Image (cartoon, rainbow, N blue to C red):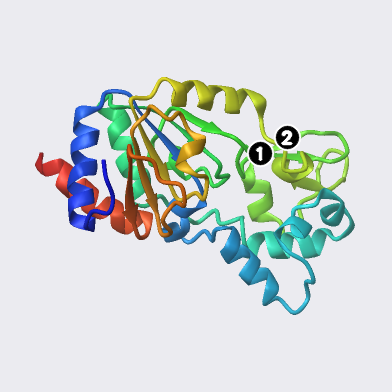
């Protein structure tokens, strides 16, 4: 596949690739969820930079020491950025779920913590950083779902009285080895990769595998077997779903 193609031609080609593939795998980043109201990292940094009461960036916010020392400030900012329990899946999430339902999509590997893939109905999802439902007490280590965070301005453990924090913060942004292993196995066995909303370069995936990249910004090292669909995930998948349904 040679670039550039017009968007309409690229959409048509992507729909044909999906139709002709039998073991598709999706790899998703923050860009798939921005149309659901969840900012990506650059958007979060912008929110934080405009906050007069906070002097730091996203990694300052997600430092467990900062959260423990400043729980009110942490949760105030967490709710402005990552924690959006009212967010709902968009057409991109639903299209991937549909592909799984009809047996074309083998699963999803995601860097997101928003749980929108599962909310859309997707069954096989590997979450490299876990998700917002996973929270623990820093004292007794009892686990809590996101209801305790949603219902309390600053959640404290009813068992021991200590602070409750999201797992991905407590882990120092560490990934889950089993989730990454599962995602890599999916990716290695795919006959088509759909890469959505991430700055990760296509050449970091298996070279032989055809790829559809959906991103607002073009990748810098595009391969011959990489098809790029520009624009937001929502807009791209609205068009892609329409064309695919007509094939």
Left or right, 163 with respect to 59, comes to right
Q: Earlier in the sequence, mark 2 or mark 1?
A: 1
- Circle 1 Cα neighbour tier, 10 Å, few/some/many (<14 / 14–19 / ≥20): some
Q: Residue at x 81, y 43 (%)?
A: 158
Front in this rendered view, residue 77 or 247 = 247
* SS for dot 1: loop
Residue sticking out furthest to the left: 246
In the displayed structure, 8 sits above or below 73; it is above
* SS for dot 2: strand
Q: Are marks 2 and 1 in contact (CB under 8 Å)?
A: yes
Picture coordinates of residue 53, whole percent (x, y): 78, 76
Picture coordinates of residue 24, whole percent (x, y): 34, 29
Picture coordinates of residue 153, whole percent (x, y): 72, 60
Q: How many labels sit on residues?
A: 2
In the displayed structure, 97 sits above or below 22; it is below
Front in this rendered view, residue 144 or 188 = 188
Image quarter where the N terminus lies is top left
Q: Which label belongs to residue 143?
A: 2
Residue sticking out furthest to the bottom: 52
Q: Which residue is mark 1?
A: 134
Q: Residue at x 15, y 47 (%)?
A: 243
Q: Please identify the quarter of the rendering in which residue 4 is found.
A: bottom left
């Amino acid at each position: 596949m040679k670039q550039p193609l017009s968007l309409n031609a690229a959409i048509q080609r992507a729909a044909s690739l999906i139709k002709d593939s039998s073991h598709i795998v999706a790899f998703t980043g923050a860009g798939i969820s921005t149309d659901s109201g969840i900012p990506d990292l650059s958007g979060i940094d912008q929110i934080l930079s405009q906050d007069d009461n906070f002097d730091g960036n996203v990694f300052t916010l997600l430092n467990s020491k900062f959260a423990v020392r400043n729980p009110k400030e942490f949760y105030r900012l967490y709710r402005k950025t990552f924690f959006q329990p009212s967010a709902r899946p968009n057409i991109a999430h639903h299209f991937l779920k549909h592909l799984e339902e009809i047996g074309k999509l083998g699963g999803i590997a995601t860097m997101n913590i928003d749980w929108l893939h599962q909310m859309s109905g997707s069954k096989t999802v590997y979450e490299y950083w876990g998700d917002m439902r996973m929270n623990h007490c820093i004292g007794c280590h009892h686990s809590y779902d996101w209801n305790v965070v949603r219902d309390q301005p600053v959640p404290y453990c009813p068992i021991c009285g200590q602070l409750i924090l999201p797992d991905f913060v407590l882990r120092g942004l560490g990934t889950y080895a089993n989730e990454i292993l599962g995602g890599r196995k999916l990716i290695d066995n795919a006959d088509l990769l759909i890469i959505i909303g991430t700055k990760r370069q296509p050449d970091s995936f298996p070279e032989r595998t055809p790829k559809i990249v959906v991103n607002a910004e073009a990748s810098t090292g595009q391969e011959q077997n990489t098809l790029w669909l520009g624009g937001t995930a929502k807009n791209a998948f609205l068009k892609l779903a329409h064309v695919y349904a007509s094939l």
